[in-house]
Image: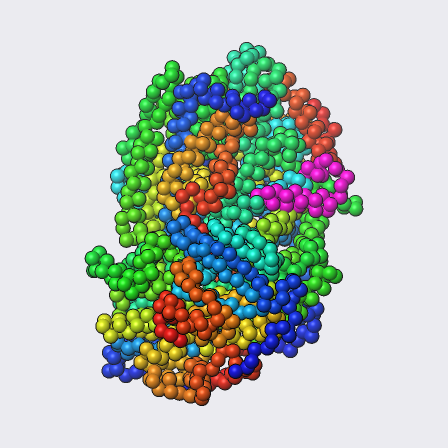
Amino acid sequence: MTTTAPAASAETAEQILEVNNIEVIYDHVILVLKGVSLSVPRGGITALLGANGAGKTTTLKAISNLLHAERGEVTKGSILFGGDEVQNLSPNDLVRRGCIQVMEGRHCFGHLSVEDNLLTGAFTRRDGQAAIREDLDLVYTYFPRLKERRNSQAGYTSGGEQQMTAIGRALMSRPKMILLDEPSMGLAPQLVEEIFEIVKQLNEEQGVSFLLAEQNTNVALRYAKYGYILESGRVVLDGEAKALRENEDVKEFYLGVGGEGRRSFRNVKHYKRRKRWLS
Amino acid sequence: MNPRPDPNQLTAPDDGIARGGVLLDVKNVSLSFGGVKAITDISLNVLKGEIRAIIGPNGAGKTSMLNVINGFYTPQEGTIIFRGKERRSMKPHQAVGQGIARTFQNVALFKGMSTLDNIMAGRSVRMKRNIGWQMLWRGPALREEIEHREKVEEIIDFLEIQYIRRTPVGKLPYGLQKRVELGRALAMEPTLLLLDEPMAGMNLEEKEDMSRFIIDVNQQRGTTIALIEHDMGVVMDLSDRVVVLDYGKKIADGPPDEVKNNQNVIDAYLGVPH
Amino acid sequence: MFYRTAGQFKTSYQADHALFPVRQDAILLGVILVFAFIVFPLTASEFTFRALLIPVLIYSLAALGLNILTGYAGQLSLGTGAFMGVGAYACYKLVSIFPEMNIVVAIAMSGFFSAAIGVLFGLPSLRIKGFYLAIATLAAQFFLVWLFQKWAWLYNYNASGAIQVPNIDMFGITVAGPRATAMTQYYFVLCVVCVITVFAINITRGRIGRMWKAVRDMDIAAELVGINLMRTKLMAFFVSSYVVGIAGALFVFMWRGAAEANLFDIPLSFRVLFIAIIGGLGSILGNFLGAILIVALPVIIGSVPQAFGIPVDSAMVEHLNIMIIGALIIAFLIIEPHGLARFWAMIREKFILWPFPH
Amino acid sequence: QDESVYIPNLAYRTGPFAATGTPLMNGQRDYITLLNERDGGLNGVKLEYDECETGYNTEKGVECYEKTKARAVVTQPWSTGITLQVLPKSNVDKIPILAPGYGFSPMADGKVFQWAYNPPSSYWDGASMILKNISDGNLDSLKDKKIAFLHLDHPFGKEPLPLLEVLAEKHGFELVPIPVGLTEMQNQSAQWLQIRRERPDFVVMWGWGAMNAGAITEAVKTKYPMDQFVGVWWSGHDGDLKLVGEQGKGYRSISWSVPNSESPLMADIKQYVVDAGKSQINQSEGEFDSVFYQRGLMISVILVEGIKAAQDEFDVRSPSPEQLRWGLENIKLDEARLKELGAEGMLVPFSTSCSNHTGHGGGWMLQWDGAKFVKASDLLTPDRAEIEPLEAEKAKEYAEANAPWPVNEECSM
Amino acid sequence: MEFLNDVFVKPFADMAAAPDFLLQVLWEGLVGGVLYALIALGFVLIYKSSRIFNFAQGIMVVFAALTLVGLYEKGVPALLALPLTLAVMLVLAMTIERVVLRPLVNQPDIILFMATIGITLFLIGFGELIFGGENKVMITEQLFIPTGSIVFEPFGGFVSIEQKDLTAVIGAMVLVAALLVFLNKSKIGRAIRALGDDHQAALSVGISLSTIWVIVWFIAGVIALATGIVWGARAGVSFALEVIAFKALPVLMLGGLESVMGAIIGGLAIGILEKLFEIYWGQPLLGGNTEAWFAYMLALLVLLFRPQGLFGEKIIERV
Ligand SMILES: Nc1ncnc2c1ncn2[C@@H]1O[C@H](COP(=O)(O)OP(=O)(O)OP(=O)(O)O)[C@@H](O)[C@H]1O
Ligand SMILES: Nc1ncnc2c1ncn2[C@@H]1O[C@H](COP(=O)(O)OP(=O)(O)OP(=O)(O)O)[C@@H](O)[C@H]1O
Ligand SMILES: [Mg+2]
Ligand SMILES: [Mg+2]
């Protein structure tokens, strides 16, 4: 529908990340992404929305070149980060260039302490111990809970604590762009707001760009500037976040507000309301 | 708003506890790991037939509480009375035998098995035929298998996951995995169902589906439910009573509306009033 | 085209629980059985029986046993060779103590000895996991082989320390010992393997198989679902060691004819493990595919230079052989870590989808 | 094809036993090469020597046996374990087994073991000769002495045990068997600590492969007197002793062959095989002069004599296995014949017969002088009177255990 | 009664009766233990960084030693052969990383374990093809390792200590100390541990698997070379050495798969205990050769009480 053709080269400078019409196949047979295109402007926050299994995680992994480890591969299209073909870069090259991913499902290093987890985030940095210490303190001010648990093995910390560790770890690499995969999952409401505030702050103060894959459409569209909606491997709708928020279909299916305000979960009717853009 | 059906109209399983009686009573439980105090002197009860929510900030000890209830952790202090029987420690599989089933915060499905097998695994405790019959796959073994298969198919229909019956669950999207996990827990036909963040990582539509399943299970089967959830909307809409934990301590307990406006809860957890 | 599953609907759970829900699979199996029971025996030479057909069957059976433990129940074992040894020595003792005993009975009973030993060494699995368990099974491996060597009663105080299969008749036909013909032994092994395979399929797809797989995939969750870990794991050790023990008895009685203790040493365990892994863990079919590959490969590689009349000396062939097998194992693991069985499944899927790529 | 005689050899040039196996196999091959090169074969028929690699692994060995048996006229199993496994099949497959200096000692009894040959001396012969030598001919002088029997824990190493036990009982010496497992060959410190504790008067070794080197280095370390340390013929490899050099001086090994690089045969080997680049030996390490290489040649000499006997008797160019069986039963390698072959003094003279498949030629003691093995005794012979009853008993046991087992009663002595 | 005496009294009486012999036994055990510890160390390093149970460590020992001796035999001076061998080990590490590990990232443990068995087979074939199967003499003197022995005469008996064994013990201590410093003081050390927990996450934070793996496998190669020199000096270099890998496995169980300290303490403990057991119990009561399994049984016993070994990381179990 709104899949844009590869952007003109003049625009490239504006876009820190460009995904052009990619296809991803798992295990040689399972076609998961069927031509996804999107772009993230330098200094922008872009949300990637969609139901379970739509392919958000896959898209993010394709961008940070992590598919390989899951027997998946990009078979068509191209991904440009800062103007360079991602396929030619190894994941650590990407991190060094400032693109880091916070993986879905936390993925902390279970046997390392929380602090060591954070420090691994600084692996690619070359700017000395002092700067790293400074950033560590910054992460601790963002997440005081982590400071309390700094010496515990990450594997034993609670789900939310692990999520904070994972986000903090990514921040430690001083990235230019962060790919956030479901950051709010399993976090207390208060913390969800805090994390998005941090995102906003980093974006505004340090110009970090974000691509967020989120289920919590409500919050995501509040903070993002632009949004894409994925459905079974295709982009079905994209636009300014504000416009999306106003869109009737988005309201109905993703925000849960019908004509008469928020619906109660208790009153969900026993009929299928599934209407799809595609199917 | 639909009025809640009168609890007394539903037939309760015959364990002698009437609907509204105390099914589970946790008394003065404390649990710590080395230096970390996960739970400090908490008492709470769950009434038969209700939906009980446990909420609290991250690391408050909610999951640990469930772990204590189903025997995975043994508390250092305190006792648990379930269906009138008191105990401190027991093996998790014994808890299952007593009628406690649960789902997990990080999906704990059997990744290599199909949806059907996962749910069938939930019925393992109820299947009895020995290896001799199994080997032959005839007579009693086959009859038993089919009998349970029918029960499982009911659950599959109920959760609307027919189309993924044969898919290995490792390949399913997260939301469906959670649903399969619920199915597996239901297959155990529990008296008390413990749900640990059943709706984390779901979009609205899926949360609505999940809510409906939970309500249906509660109302149609009369299953008592204790649930942990971070989505306040869900908690407020579904639960009959809410207990709030913070740093391993209980800071509030009561009906949703009351808890929602409790200042301690707002400070520790909600941030802004909902 | 030939492989269309569409249109085959099951109308009852009973039908859905048949051995081969898909018709084509049943036909394929039929063809294979015809080959195994009729075509091979008519065409194979003595050498083919002894170097290919019999060992493939026996190794498949051993791998099947291991696969039950490692592939289904998730307990890595490196002691298969020793458990085969227990089966073999038990059978040997049974036959020498009760010479009138029918050999089928003796073999079936010898499985119980290895099963018992297997359970004994399986006990640590309740506490020990992963590689620690694997190394623990090596304890069985080394201890048992040592025992086979030191306990002279086991080999009837033979001077050589080896066990030697006597001539054994069944219904007037010599089925074991130096006088037995390769074809008799082949049929004997084939029948045993078929029966046990059917049993194994049934066990692994029923309640017990599900419990094993649950323990394998996530033992904590399995416990929380009400599965008794201890009983389930020990049951896996029991069944697995039973099958492995039978394979061991066949190994000596129907193939080797004699055995020294160190025949059951580590290399045997590893070979069986290779077969199970290359074939595919958690698959019954895989064991057969793996055995075909691992047994046939050296024979083929060894005969290639001869076939082309290239004079290579035997040591060189052996060195190259080892190198090639090593490289092939790595290559296979890279191409398809889940083994030949998965490879086959993928081909099947492509067939079903054919002519569409996805 | 009938213009050649196919002689497979179940060789091992790989694995932990390759070090001792390789020079032997080289010797075997080179003698055949010599005949083919120098004489154009045997009586005009080419000999086709072929190796099948076993790695000293019994299982692989049996595989090789199955693989080669279709064309083979003889089986050379090259390990006692493999010999024991193919032995029961010999009556069925009817291919003679030739195991010079190894295998099952009772194979000497040709009436029972119609298809197996272990000339010129069996292990029991060897054990008897060693005891005779260390007791200066009077076994009773060993009374109350302690003899450690250090052996590979393998059929090969256990083979002389029954005889040694009988002799220990009879002559009143204490026998301390010390097994060395396949995995401990290279690290025998436990075994040698035991030897140090037991303080035996003699250590008799039945070692092979990497075990020999391990034992000899440990002996040096433990300061065990080398002249009280004696090995069987497979424990007398130059390479093993070179590891310790001077310190190994005095070590002895019984042998039924003696290297003699000056002999006419060796000159021919050098001319036709080694210098012609047709040999695989490692000349820089002095393999040409080594005991094992030249023993390998002798092994082929024995086989070829058997083939030749068969050719002459049946007047065929390429004898069948059955004919070869007759040939191996009628080998006459006396001194004259050895001289004729240019190998005088390199092999103990012996002859076989229908009932005597070993020949019991005896052997010499070889002693390490710090740089090489030298002959250190006159020809020793086993005390057959002590061995024979045991041989007969074990052969009978074997036949009974493997019933139905045909016994050739027609053998005349 | 007599049995109890044999088991509980006599061995100790024997020890007291010949203290010099006991000392010798302990020393032999210690030397053996050092060697086990060295091999175990190679395992630990690789396991720590990649959760790969590297079965090929044993053959790497042989391969390194053979390369060293082989080069020397081909006429390369000993002091040049040493760095050349190190270069070969580096190339080996790089090849293994490129050909085996990289394509197998994120595969289950058992698959990687199998792959290392594949490597083992390949190296056996390759090594024999190039260097031949015969037993070779380690170039001890050429590497300036002292030979000869020191003899003490305590308690009226004697204890003989081989100088090369002594060198081995000292050398091993230095190597281990260096390694501990490297692992604890460097950023790579932390990355190595992180890698062990989660490959994908490590990739996602920019840890380069390839680099770390090459480093780790190279260090393992260096350790293998050290082990090979020491062990080869005792009994010559041949493929029979390969089996010593199996002696390291119980050490790992005892010490814990990811603990450097565990490998060392476990190695020494097993070396000494198995020797004592063999000499004082095994040989008199059980027919000897108990070293084949003693270490395994001991480790098994310990594991029953500590499933992660004495110093291993606790297995994380929470839901
Ligand atoms: N390793 C894999 N092998 C095969 N299929 C996979 C694999 N990973 C994901 N898939 C499939 O790809 C599809 C997209 O998955 P993906 O994880 O990208 O979805 P998502 O949008 O992130 O969903 P969620 O909201 O549940 O995280 C799903 O149908 C899933 O089953
Ligand atoms: N097995 C364990 N070992 C050590 N500490 C533990 C263990 N289990 C839980 N904890 C600690 O106990 C505290 C409570 O953990 P718990 O998992 O119960 O939190 P939670 O309330 O479920 O949090 P979340 O909402 O983030 O899941 C945490 O600080 C956690 O680190
Ligand atoms: Mg996702
Ligand atoms: Mg929790």
The verdict on residue C37 being magenta is no
Left or right of residue C72: residue A192: left
Instruction: Return the residue nearer the eye: B75 or A187.
Output: B75
Q: Is residue A181 above or below residue A251?
A: above
Report the quarter where the C terminus of chain B lies.
Answer: bottom left
User: Which residue corresponds to the image point at 65% horizontal and 60% vertical from the top-left?
Assistant: B126
Left or right of residue E80: residue D280: right
What is the chief secondary structure element of the magenta stretch? helix
User: Which residue corresponds to the image point at 43% horizontal and 52% vertical from the top-left?
Assistant: B32
Instruction: Return the residue nearer the eye: E264 or A10.
Output: E264
Quadrant of residue D413 within the rendered picture: top right
Counting from the top left corner in percent of width and height, residue C331 is at 46, 58
Q: Is residue C70 visible?
A: no
Left or right of residue B40: residue D355: right
Quadrant of residue C44 within the rendered picture: bottom right
Counting from the top left corner in percent of width and height, residue C334 is at 45, 60
Q: Is residue A110 above or below residue B209?
A: above
Q: Which residues are magenta?
A: C92-121
Quadrant of residue B40 within the rendered picture: bottom left
The verdict on residue C101 being magenta is yes
User: Which residue corresponds to the image point at 48% horizontal and 55% vertical from the top-left?
Assistant: B28
Q: Is residue C90 above or below residue D220?
A: below
User: Which residue corresponds to the image point at 63% horizontal and 73% vertical from the top-left?
Assistant: B8
Q: Is residue D194 visible?
A: yes
